[in-house]
Amino acid sequence: MSVLYLLDLLGTFAFALSGALTAVKKEMDLFGVVVLALVTAIGGGTTRDILLGSTPVFILTQPVYLYVSLAGAVCTFLFYKTLFKINSIILIVDALGLGTFVCIGLSKALTAGISGPGAVMLGVITAVMGGIIRDVLSGQIPSVLTRDFYAVTCVAGGILYLFLWRQNMAADMLLLLTTGFIFTLRLLAIRYRWNFIKAPYSGPET
């Protein structure tokens, strides 16, 4: 079992927890918790596969991701009080998963012959689309569009991955450096509350 595969499963579990915790906050029932856990964990990878024309999509041929996502949903439903208390740990694992998902998306895109900018786009989609679907289903403006330097971190990591890939860097080192970069940048953004540039709109003119 490769390190990439283990990180992928860990990231899937962390994303499932994130979706399920959002459902709990919104006072959804068990079905809602499961749905939000699933879409958050597998929504990005599924969207990527559809855009690549890679069908059946990965979740239909590799059910382990479904099992991991369901485990995250059930754990959240049963132990949500404890999970809310250790949210900082979940954010750390989530950041690790974020970096891994970007790398997987880019790797699959480049293997399929997608252009550099297109590959970066698919890497970002793999990492953030699940969270976007989660927020839309829970009635929120997607957080990736408003705060936390989330998507910007993925774009920066994707560009780094593409640059190193073009230097013919070994796959393991490529994964390590890119994931480490995204992980570090994401934690710094959380710690110092970084946000991307916003228009200084203060309301209608009078």
Image (cartoon, grey):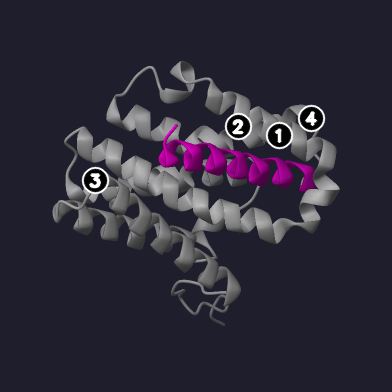
Marks 4 and 3: CB-CB under 8 Å?
Answer: no
Badge 2 element:
helix
Badge 4 element:
helix
Identify which amino acid the numbered label 4 is placed on: Leu
Mark 2 = which residue? 38
Does the magenta segment cover residue 193? no
Identify which amino acid the numbered label 3 is placed on: Gly
Judge by depth and name the residue closer to the eye, 32 or 102: 102
Mark 1 = which residue? 73
Identify which amino acid the numbered label 2 is placed on: Leu
Neighbour class for label 2 at 10 Å: few (<14), some, many (≥20)?
Answer: many
Q: What is the magenta segment's predominant secondary structure?
A: helix
Mark 4 = which residue? 30
Q: Quadrant of the N terminus?
A: top left
For marks 2 and 3, give the CA distance: 26 Å
At x 51%, y 56%, the residue is 144
Mark 3 = which residue? 118
